[in-house]
Image (spheres, grey):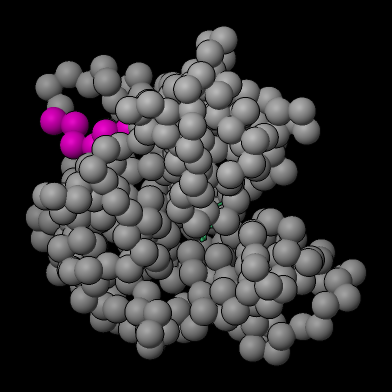
Amino acid sequence: MSDQLLAIARQFADSASHITPLGNGLINDTFLVKSGSQTFVLQRINTQVFPNPEQIMANFVSLSRHITQKNGVDVRLQLPQILSTVINTALYQDEQGGAWRALSFIADSESLETVRTLDDVRQAGQALGHFHRLLSDLEPGTLHDTLPGFHITPGYLQQYRQVLTHTLVKQDPYCAEFIDRFQHRADALEAAKQQGLLSLRVIHGDPKLNNFLFDVNSRQIISLIDLDTVKPGLVHYDVGDCVRSCCHNTDTGEFDLKCCGALLTGYFSEAGAFFTDHDYQYLYPAIRLIPFELGLRFYTDYLQGNRYFKVTEPEQNLRRAAEQFRLCESIQTQESAINSLIAELRPGE
Ligand code: GN1
Ligand code: MG
């Protein structure tokens, strides 16, 4: 543990004594800090990606306030608390301009890298639906857009075309062809938004499996973390992202339909309260689009020399991209089964 890191942790807690890396996020740097009997999470926000970290903190405060003020609603998710610096600021800026913040650690919790049982996935769907429902009466316009362009697939496509004009990295035939074949679908959700078929709500932005915290004893989900991308958007981005992360059998590379059924069962038990016909209609397009979008983002980053997503070796983003495109192909081959599943599980039908 470097002295520099310890000095930063001590900006938040005088007696910080022990620091270890936490999780495997691809953007921010995250650590677990021990300070006396207290344990907390310390994070360096990547300001290349999030140029206004104070907006992230402001959104966090709005969100926590909204949830704590809910009357008569059974709130089943805890949010981490912001821990201020010893001089009472939400962020600490280091000498290199890095932005640091501290959050409480949810005790006796664990995150999963792979699902253990179908019930884990049902719970993830339900927790995401619960999160959306809790925020369904928070006016999205009151939140900052912490990451403009996030999940706007046509924008990523444009960026890809731009990078192609100057990259010196050799194109990968599988990825390049896949993007060419799929690109006409890139605006599926944005067009529906423009036409007023889907409306902006408050979204999580990154509800992948390892952002749900399970109680180690009860195995129930008790928290949804990584709230940096909470902002106005389409809940479809979230459902697509949760499905692509939970229902991807990484051994076979295939999309797991059973798992998708469990996730949607959980999600509909909460989202049924506010979902419209159009919301249901655009679920399949979202489930198909988000793996394409993530693959496109990984591939573009590979072509531009891995500037956005952390890598441990230069071809890692290429491999990540190909995995997402294979998942997208597997989803496409199961299109009618996925649509039938949505129709069958849709509440009140
Ligand atoms: C990034 O850093 P992490 O792992 O929480 C990315 C997500 C991707 C994810 C893929 C702000 O999240 O969109 O789905 O990697 N976050 C941002 O692992 O770009
Ligand atoms: Mg994240």
In the foreground, 133 or 7: 7
Q: Which residues are magenta?
A: 74-79
Q: In the rendered image of this protein, does residue 265 appear above or below residue 184?
A: above
Q: Position of residue 274 (x, y in %)?
A: 24, 42
In the foreground, 137 or 215: 215
Regarding residue 213, the answer to whether it shows in the image is: yes
Residue 35 placement, left or right of 26: left
Prevailing secondary structure of the magenta residues? loop
What residue is drawn where x is 78% and y is 66%? 305
Q: Position of residue 347 (x, y in %)?
A: 13, 56
Q: In the rendered image of this protein, does residue 235 appear above or below residue 294?
A: above
Regarding residue 193, the answer to whether it shows in the image is: no
Q: How many marks?
A: 0
Quarter of image, res 134: top left
Magenta span includes 166 = no
What residue is drawn where x is 11% and y is 50%? 218
Q: Position of residue 136 (x, y in %)?
A: 31, 34
In the foreground, 316 or 77: 316
What residue is drawn where x is 64% and y is 60%? 310
Q: In the rendered image of this protein, does residue 66 appear above or below residue 345?
A: above
Q: Position of residue 11 (x, y in %)?
A: 58, 21
